[in-house]
Image: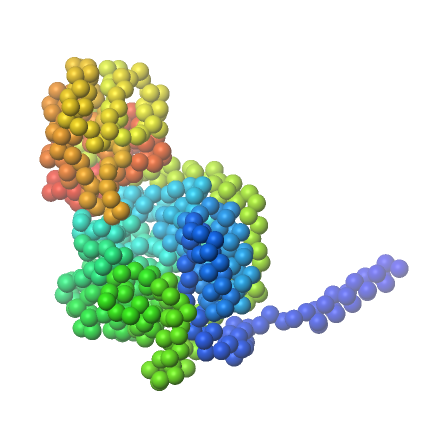
Amino acid sequence: MKHLKLLFGLLVLLVAAVWAPAQPTKQQWVQSTLKSMSLREQIAQLFVIACHPQQSEEHINKVLETIKNEHLGGIIWGLCSPTRYLNLLNQMQEHANIPLLVTMDAEWGVAMRLDSVVNFPRQLTMGAIQDNQLIYDFGAEVARQCRLLGVHINFAPVVDVNINPNNPVISMRSFGENKYKVTEKGYACMKGMLDGGLLTCLKHFPGHGDTDKDSHEELPAILHNKQRLNDVELYPFRELIKRGATGVMTAHLLVPALSKDHMPASQSKKISTDLLQKKLKFKGLVITDGLEMRGAIRDGDPNKVALNALLAGNDLLEIPPDIPKSIDEIVKAVQNGKVSKRFIQKKCKKILETKYDLGLYRGFSPIDPSGIIEKLNTVEAKSLRLQLAATSLTLLSNQNVLPLADSDLNYLEIGQGSAFKEQLFRHASINAFQISPSATQEQLDSLSALLPNTGTVVVGYHNVPRGRSYVNFTIDEPMLNFLEELNSRHPVVLLFFANPYALANFKDLGRFAAVVACYDNSDEAQISAAKAITGAQKFLGKLPVTINPQYKENFGLITP
């Protein structure tokens, strides 16, 4: 009887093996899928639509309708909660004829787009970290988070070399001004993500680091000669392409030395094809920056921007103003002979091959949103966030006042820094004062009268006012004068929880008893800073950018 049962079991397995559908090879799946598609559907696979869940239901329905009617290839996400994101993603994928490529701008983790998730530091903060293994660990953690959320491509890392302190759009998004360090940190980040199963995208080609205009609002120009561009801007891209980059994003930049056609790099064949794909031998996905940006559209027909980008050599066309009309223009271009059907098929095939490699030929399985917040916010993720903050802190000066003594301390909180104050209070009993960064002269005079005549004053400078851009930080003249005058009466320890470029507002940083660049106002940065100035941990960071001639890139006092 036992032998009969065993024989029956083997027979069932044999029948199942015979009748089970064989997994198609990449070539089989791509070719069969391509043949089943109309010209318009092949074109639609090249488009990435934006979904902004914080907008109206009308917007959501329009995105769903466009995905269903046009059979689009990809989607990129705006701000929302992880749970709402997953519910919508499941819905969007159900409407897709072929599973969507899911993309996200997660330069500093998915918290760049989703709330309730560990908010990792910006790239400039990580530019101060000397141990690139931590940058790799960050990349691996971002990959883990993205995979939980069904994200296939992260539009990161940013490998622009931020040489211009007045850059309004890159700044804190760059690893710094040193091309070698940008390259090595960019590689560590990229490798961590790739090893974690996430496709990456270097940006913004051919280099957005030396601009003083925001391509979201206008078309910046890079006016350097070829030698300088090749030596600086192109260096990280060239090196990381050699090391296995899977994607490159083309920027909306005018670069006359590389192209005389007066087109943005994203729409210039000289740059997107001849330079990137032929000269630099890049074989991965070429992806445009958002085609709804003013730098892409300029004064031309917004519905032809995607066509121009396609002709330039891009594979994925991200967020043109009107996707159906943009597809119409490409269909017309095929019909009038400006674009060949073979060219469209070649581009569509590249997208389908990527989808096959990602396993999307199997279809899409809905992702269960239950417990997603806990899955994203692991103990390990939180620990890594704290470690990144701790190792980035950069000591710029110390006139023998650090670590702080346990007595006769005063704390002045400029803005909001409750985590720093709470941690500092664990060290000693401290007289605490608080004032707004935009305090009037009268308010500053009143504060001056309240401060004790003796003792060290620890100043936590939080919430530095700024606009939408990453520069134009304002520190009012009365506040600057107040702090410098305060330092003439007391030893002042200045902890600056903001973009280090803003420290250039101070006339003479070297006169302060101690200065620490903390980079951001996160709780993790505040807790780490309080521990460092009280001697509980070391200062390990170095400046990723130059503040002034006294404090240049790579400056930092490392404590033993």
Q: Residue at x 19, y 44 (%)?
A: 472
Residue 37, percent across and down?
51, 76
465 or 203, which lies in front?
465
* Residue 411, percent from left and from top: 25, 22
Residue 219 higher or lower than 332, as above or below: above
Apparent side of residue 477 relative to residue 281 in the rendered image (left or right)? left
Quarter of the image where one finds residue 207: bottom left
Q: Residue furthest right?
A: 1
Residue found at x 68% / y 69%? 20
Which quadrant does the N terminus fall into? Answer: bottom right
Residue at 37%, 57% in the rendered image = 155
Image location (x, y in percent) of residue 94: 56, 61
x 79%, y 63%: residue: 9
The residue sitting at the bottom extreme is 337
Is residue 344 depicted above or below 286 in this figure?
A: below
| Residue 555 in sight in this render | no
Reply above or below: 335 against 122: below
Q: Is residue 155 left or right of residue 221?
A: right
Q: Nearer the viewer, residue 84 or 224?
A: 84
Q: Is residue 24 left or right of residue 67?
A: right
**Scheme of image coloration:** rainbow
Q: Nearer the viewer, residue 373 or 532?
A: 373
Query: In the picture, which quadrant includes the C terminus?
Result: top left
252 to the left or right of 375: left
